[in-house]
Each structure stands twice: as structure tokens, then as C-alpha cells.
């Protein structure tokens, strides 16, 4: 859990923005709610010197000092690079400098690396073309590139969370863990629209078996607080991501956060679903037209259930408590209403506004 600069600041991010984000994580209570990584995404990179050592650009005067500042707040420092010659925003990538860059990051006190495929796709295309279009050649080259950086990070001796970003092509959930990856993007980029967010979230059905403690599916960063979705839509976003046991990386401007957005991001009970000690990712129980139900097994024999209404009207969404293991009924807790719904049995039904959700925790 943490914050990443990309969704709000994109290519304009500065050292001052990152320090303000760190300050805000503390002052808003987000750090204490669990958001500890402060991740600088693309566009911090400058030029390499004669020895090949990477330096930040003029918007980031001193990365070691930035890392020290972040650490002084009880937070962790994340950075970004690409296995290609260039990053997605066409800044300097790590190709041919993997060990050297890993060493530099460790010297700066980096605790997290997002490694984004970007221009490495050109290397893959070239290799495939040289092998009569064999896509396996490209895939093997990509896996080798991710492995190389994984080994370079390990060799630094500093624990650095390794986050693969290659948009979910070639099923990274199958080969990521063996490379030491702690998380891997499962989709292309999110944006601050209900349509894109729900499409990404829904596409995660079936992936639960690949996630577990230390290695997670990553359906991309949060858009909560960026302003283009309604409160119900942001609650849907947060609910689906916690059911998915997704890495929770806020992507908004933390210095200008509304009380509603802060409430969604810092909901203790929603976060507890995401961070539950079993480390089980949830999955879709069923889908019927624009309505669907997702469940996630929690510690203590509890189950989190999300009832989602993807339609444009208010609709009733139901779940049969017997079907999720409570044939003698169960106690229900509504997470967003912060209300106990009492002991119920049989079919539980909730009236849900358009694009809304009811998130409950069910226990014996
Ligand atoms: C890709 C990634 C995004 C972001 C940008 C930065 O699009 O998927 O998350 O890191 O690159 O350029």
C-alpha cells in the first residue's frame, strides 16, 4: 500500500510534489491506515555520466536526499524504470545497465521498483522478426530481461519490492513469481472513468489462484480522488480492488483530498479485507447481465462479499448465504454503511444505486 505519482502528476512530477505527498500521507492518516510506499513513477530520469551511472533530471535535484526525507516520515521510497533503452515517456531506461542501476537505487535507499516494459517491446519485435515471427522468442527475451533486473536487485542485498509492469500480456502471473517478482500488472493502464475501471476490475475474474503472500496480481493503481467518478463509482473501485487483494497505490493529489475520498481510501474495514492475513484473492461468484457478486475468503472463517450493480438504474442484487458456506445463516456487516445488519439466513438482497456496490463481511 502506498502512493504513486503517475495517475495525477504524470510527466510533470517534481521533488516538491513527492515530498508534499509524503507529508500528506502522514497528516491525512493515510500512512497509519497502511499506505507507506511513496513511488516516483516515470520522468524522474536524467542522463548517464561517463561511467554509465544514471542521474535524475532537474526536477529531482537529489534522489538520496529525497529518499532520506521519505524515510524520515516512516515511509518507503519507490522508483521506476524500464528494461528497454527508453521508458514509456521516453526517458532513460535500464537496458545494459541493470546491475549498475540496481546498485544506484540501493544507494539512494530505494525500497520498491516498478519495471515497465515500454520500449523493450521493440527488442522483442526485432528478435521475433529474426525468427520468422516466432512470438515465443520475444516472450523468452522479455522474461530474461525481467529476470536480469530481479537478480540485480537481489544482489544489492537491500530488500526491494519488485513490481513488473508489462500490461498483463503473456500471463505474467505464471512466470513472475519465479523471477522474484512481488507483483505484476495484469492489465493495460487504468484511467479515471467508470468504464475503464470496471472493465479492468471485471477482467480479473479467474486470476485468484495466482496471488498469495509475497506475490500479487496488480490491476493497476487507484483513481479514487482524481475527480471524474461519482462517490458510488469510487466505492465500487475500492471495493473491487480490496476483494482482489490488490496492491493499493493511491494515485490522487493528497494535498487536495475531499473528506469523502479520504474516507474511501482510509476505510479501516475495507483495507482489512484487502490486507487480510490469509492473503487470498477474491473472485467472481457469478455474473448476471449488469449485476455481479464477488467473494473473498477471510481469516476466521469469514467471507467478504461485494454485490455490484454495473447498470444505469437502481437494481436489487442478491447472494445466497448457503452458497457461500453459511447454510445456517450468518452475521452481516455493511462495510460502507459501517453498520451491523444482524443475523440473516437464506438469500440476502441489497438495493443498489447505478454503478454502486454493497460490500459486506459475513461471519458465523
Ligand atoms: C505505462 C505504465 C503506467 C505509467 C506510464 C509511465 O503506461 O503502464 O502505469 O507507469 O507507463 O510512462
Image (cartoon, rainbow, N blue to C red):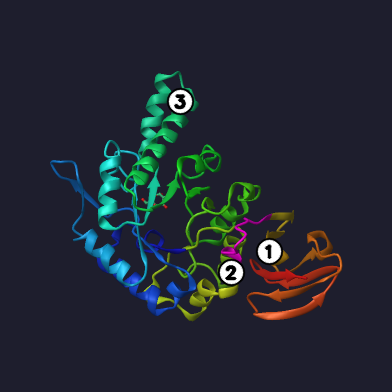
Is disc 3 surrounded by few (<14), some (14 to 19) or many (20+) residues within 10 Å? Answer: some
Name the residue at 52% across, 41% down: 172
Q: Secondary structure at mark 2?
A: helix
Q: Secondary structure at mark 3?
A: helix
- Residue 72 in percent (x, y) is at 30, 71
The numbered disc on residue 272 is 2
Residue on which disc 1 sits = 308
Indicate which disc, 2 or 3, sits on the residue closer to the N terminus.
3
The CA span between labels 3 and 1 is 41 Å
Q: Point out the residue furthest to the front here.
A: 157
Name the residue at 77% across, 74% down: 331
Q: Quadrant of residue 239?
A: bottom right
- Quadrant including the C terminus: bottom right
Q: Secondary structure at mark 1?
A: strand
Marks 3, 1: nearer the viewer: 3
Name the residue at 65% across, 74% down: 335
The CA span between labels 1 and 2 is 19 Å
Name the residue at 66% across, 47% down: 206
Residue 276 located within the stretch drawn in magenta: yes
Residue 41 located within the stretch drawn in magenta: no
Q: Quadrant of residue 44?
A: bottom left
Range shown magenta: 272-283
- Residue 32 in percent (x, y) is at 45, 75
Is disc 2 surrounded by few (<14), some (14 to 19) or many (20+) residues within 10 Å? Answer: some
Amino acid at each position: 500500500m502506498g502512493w504513486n505519482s503517475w495517475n495525477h502528476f504524470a510527466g510533470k512530477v517534481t521533488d516538491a510534489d513527492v515530498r508534499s505527498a509524503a507529508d500528506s500521507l502522514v497528516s491525512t492518516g493515510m500512512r497509519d491506515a497502511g499506505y507507506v510506499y511513496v513511488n516516483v513513477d516515470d520522468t524522474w530520469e536524467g542522463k548517464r555520466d561517463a561511467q554509465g551511472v544514471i542521474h535524475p533530471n532537474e526536477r529531482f535535484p537529489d534522489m538520496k536526499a529525497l529518499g532520506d526525507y521519505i524515510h524520515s516520515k516512516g515511509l518507503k521510497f519507490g522508483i521506476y524504470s524500464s528494461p528497454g533503452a527508453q521508458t514509456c515517456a521516453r526517458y532513460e531506461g535500464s537496458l545494459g545497465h541493470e546491475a549498475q542501476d540496481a546498485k544506484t537505487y540501493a544507494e539512494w535507499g530505494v525500497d520498491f521498483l516498478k519495471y515497465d516494459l515500454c520500449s523493450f517491446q521493440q527488442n522483442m519485435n526485432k528478435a521475433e522478426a529474426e525468427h520468422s515471427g516466432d512470438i515465443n522468442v520475444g516472450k523468452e527475451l522479455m522474461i530474461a530481461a525481467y529476470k536480469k533486473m530481479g537478480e540485480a536487485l537481489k544482489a544489492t542485498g537491500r530488500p526491494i519490492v519488485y513490481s513488473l509492469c508489462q500490461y498483463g500480456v503473456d500471463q505474467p502471473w505464471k512466470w513472475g513469481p519465479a523471477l522474484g517478482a512481488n507483483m505484476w500488472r495484469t492489465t493495460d493502464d487504468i484511467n479515471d472513468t467508470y468504464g475503464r475501471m470496471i472493465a479492468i476490475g471485471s477482467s480479473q475474474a479467474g486470476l485468484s489462484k495466482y496471488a498469495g503472500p509475497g506475490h500479487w496480481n496488480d490491476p493497476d493503481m487507484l483513481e479514487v480522488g482524481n475527480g471524474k467518478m461519482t462517490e458510488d463509482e469510487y466505492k465500487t473501485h475500492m471495493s473491487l480492488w480490496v476483494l482482489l487483494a490488490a496492491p493499493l497505490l493511491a494515485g490522487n493529489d493528497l494535498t487536495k483530498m475531499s473528506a469523502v475520498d479520504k474516507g474511501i481510501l482510509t476505510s479501516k474495514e475495507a483495507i482489512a479485507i484487502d490486507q487480510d492475513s490469509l492473503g487470498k484473492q477474491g473472485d467472481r461468484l457469478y455474473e448476471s447481465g449488469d449485476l455481479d457478486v464477488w467473494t473473498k475468503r477471510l481469516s476466521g472463517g469469514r467471507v467478504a462479499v461485494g454485490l455490484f450493480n454495473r447498470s444505469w438504474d437502481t437494481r436489487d442484487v442478491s447472494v445466497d448465504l448457503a452458497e457461500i458456506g453459511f447454510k445456517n445463516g450468518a452475521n452481516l456487516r455493511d462495510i460502507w454503511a459501517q453498520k451491523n445488519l444482524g443475523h440473516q439466513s437464506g438469500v440476502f438482497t441489497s438495493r443498489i444505486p447505478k454503478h454502486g456496490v454493497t460490500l459486506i463481511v459475513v461471519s458465523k
